[in-house]
Amino acid sequence: MINDIQLDPAAPLQQQLYRQLSQRIIGRRYLPGSQLPSSRQLAADLGVSRNTVNAVYDQLKAEGFLLSLAGKGVFINKDIRSTLNQPDQLPSHSQSTTAPLPPLPIVPKHSLRLGEDANLPFQPGLPDLDAFPIRSWNRILHHQESRRLLRGYDCIQGYQPLRRAITEYIRTSRGVRCEEHQVIVTNGAQQALSLIGDVLLQEGDRVFFENPGYRGARYALSRYGNPLLPVPLKGQVLDVGVLADMGPAKLLFCTPTHQYPMGGILDIAQRMALVEWAQRNQTWIIEDDYDSEFHFHNKPFAAIQGLFDKTPVLYVGSFSKTLLPGLRVGYLVVPEPMVEAFLWAKRISGGETPLLAQATIAEFIESGQFSRHLRRMRQLYRDKWLYFQKRVSEELTGLVTPVAESAGMHLVLKGNFDDVNLSQQLRALGFGSTPLSAHFIGDTQQTGLVMGFASASEREIEAGVSALKSLLQSD
Amino acid sequence: MINDIQLDPAAPLQQQLYRQLSQRIIGRRYLPGSQLPSSRQLAADLGVSRNTVNAVYDQLKAEGFLLSLAGKGVFINKDIRSTLNQPDQLPSHSQSTTAPLPPLPIVPKHSLRLGEDANLPFQPGLPDLDAFPIRSWNRILHHQESRRLLRGYDCIQGYQPLRRAITEYIRTSRGVRCEEHQVIVTNGAQQALSLIGDVLLQEGDRVFFENPGYRGARYALSRYGNPLLPVPLKGQVLDVGVLADMGPAKLLFCTPTHQYPMGGILDIAQRMALVEWAQRNQTWIIEDDYDSEFHFHNKPFAAIQGLFDKTPVLYVGSFSKTLLPGLRVGYLVVPEPMVEAFLWAKRISGGETPLLAQATIAEFIESGQFSRHLRRMRQLYRDKWLYFQKRVSEELTGLVTPVAESAGMHLVLKGNFDDVNLSQQLRALGFGSTPLSAHFIGDTQQTGLVMGFASASEREIEAGVSALKSLLQSD
């Protein structure tokens, strides 16, 4: 019966013999119930040691492929022809290995963008990776790397010293009012946004969304099919005045301290009106405070979360821009009675955040190096912002209109062109950007490019502006 | 007007003055439209430098709290009484800072367990943290820690060298049939399970679940309210024979190579019957292969994913047990046509997996140290397993019935006691465990303790068994 085994003497014999025998039984080339040669016989036929054959037979017996019947020999388990698989119940081709898969999910069309290189100069959201103080950072990593505590399971909410450091930081620098137990460490701001949807959205709940707005949030908040209602901007910021006529909403997403991508900043009157509307309307505000560390003329305006003692605000922050995207650490601040619901949502959707990164960030903040790093980056990005604006004004006047606010890591260059196509052409030349039109919900669209200057060196700014000029002029 | 400012000379003056002025305007103690003293006057009144007052006034002007009217002085912005907030539209208490929050989410009752210390000896799923080769690991970490590539954004699917290493590992050691582009790196196995729910479950889709079974998977797969139908065990493994009468299902969750928590192993006849049922029934099988590395008598049985060329199987693995829980890295293998849908789901729910951990694991595998570590741990856990069984049989015979299979990192001790209470009592004494009854869906419940021996030293095994004996005898 066994005359079709081929062993390659250069590869592990036992593994080959196991695979070939098991596959022939699974494929029903060797039939259930039939007898196999003795291990002595098979070893002789194949020219291998009897130990090899015995080890394979033992494994196959353990897995239920083979049975030893005392005094009779070794047989293929006839139960492999299972009760579920009787010939009279099944058409003959049902044993085929090419049975169709169950129905496949529908792939969203957005996913085409997944293959793009996200680390090109001008990629929005990308910090200056070369300016990161990697030596100081690694010194802290080395303090933490051998601690037994960081090897095991952590609490879902996040490493306690990191939550303490975040609490102190956002209280002092952002005016957020919170206690440590309201802070939840997340796998980047994206997880924070996704958890908000998990916890709060019921079927049919309406979500208000500033338009244009941040796509990552839009995708996270529309994943359950909830209606997403665009709120227009007025003077580059959310138009608070129109909200009163828009009816009920469960959530409102906004970036009050630096509108993404248009760059406007809500003033105090607008902030207060927004919070009062939310209180009257029973709406939760998501305050995405994604790059407030980088305001160039004034201190960043205090977060709306801290305007009053008790605001209906879910505050989202991230270390992807202030430290490194590769860390994937963000945070979420929620009112105390919601903490447990968020922890549960975090637990079932992905569990803890990696500990070593959390501990390293905590020490980096506590040692004062985080503040120093932010000061240095604020100066660096301010210089890049000024230089980029200068080059744009020198080379691209008449071709694009910059929308310049004195903050952040990106600039919008508006213009009447096919921005999707232009962004792809720039990418082919090695420069990142995103089309402005992609940030709009519905029909009201403007065109332009969102360009992140933080990741570009002076030389790259020079080259990127030239490349853009050529593309726009050849249009 | 300003006669209620109190500055502490020992704290930053500018910050204090900013906070007190802004809070009094927000709280309407200083009314919109009213005039402020000149900076010279206020500086003199407070006994601080005029520069301090000027800096605060500038920030408050930038944020829209104050306006300068040429020749007249500095006024509180009267727009702070916004159009949304006219006295005739609002009851007087609407400016209260204690406005109620919008409706709060309902907290699931499971979440009570979140505060538990998950790193006690006998905690199921916890590896031996002291046996981890931390020095070799850190040497590899040091190779990787300064690479610029690891600072930026990565592709959602995972770091390519890690996907290559995982592919090679699961092909060789687990018989999984896959190419690198079918492997998705996840934030622990929990995210993999959650993504499967995100991608595949539509309203009303039925999920079959082995009973008892792994709670993390149960929570992840029931989060959208889909009906979860328990499939009973037979001889400590999923009873494949009953499936034919259970009707349609979108998903079936199982742990074929080491049933969690009961420990049974599906033999080849049962595996083939299961896959054939799934193909006929158009059901996806989730194969959670959570601890197959630790089989003590035989090699672990090959994964059902690789039985045939094309199986309807979503294969889930993790480094939490083979390396460290604190890393939070797992993986998911899906058929090629599903990859894009999973990447999209991962992108919107949390984005990339941290890069430095991925790169370190990749080098640890490629260097051969992962295989060596697994061999050492297999021997170590085998010794602990034997010792724990010996102590249980010596001390607890008649009190509990061990359900022993020759694999894994835990043992179930069945017995007629209040297992929830007993587990809490053990925890109070410093020993982890989970109650067996908590692993059941519905009414068919058995009681006992699930105890992880991998994390316990010989001395802790000794002490834990004694503690359990005392608790059981005092009952």
Image (spheres, coloured by chain):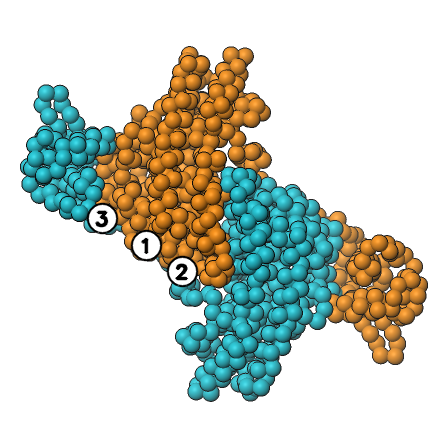
Chain colours: A orange, B cyan
How far apart, in angstroms, are the residues tagged by discs 2 and 3? 27 Å
Q: Is residue B309 left or right of residue B370?
A: right
- Residue A145, above or below B31: below
Q: Quadrant of the N terminus of chain B?
A: top left
Foreground disc of the pair 1, 3: 1
Q: Chain of mark 3?
A: A
Q: Indicate the amino acid at tag 3.
A: Asp
Residue shown at 42% from the left, 76% from the top:
B429
Q: Are marks 1 and 3 on the same chain?
A: yes
What secondary structure is marked by label 1?
helix
The percent position of residue B97, horizontal first and vertical second, equals 19, 47
Q: Is residue A348 visible?
A: no
Query: What residue is drawn where x is 84% and y is 66%?
Result: A53
User: How packed is label 1: few (under 14 Cα within 10 Å), some, or many (20 or more)?
Assistant: some
Mark seen at residue B108 = 2
* SS class, disc 2: loop
Q: CA distance from mark 1 to mark 3?
A: 16 Å
Q: Residue at x 47, y 74 (%)?
A: B431
Q: Marks 2 and 1, how far apart in space?
A: 22 Å
Q: Chain of mark 2?
A: B
Instruction: Name the chain letter of the residue that bears numbered label 1.
Output: A
**Which residue shows up at 62% across the image and 50% down it?**
B363
Amino acid, disc 2: Pro
Where's residue A89, x and y in %?
76, 60
Residue that label 1 marks? A180
Contact, mark 2 vs mark 3 (Cβ under 8 Å): no
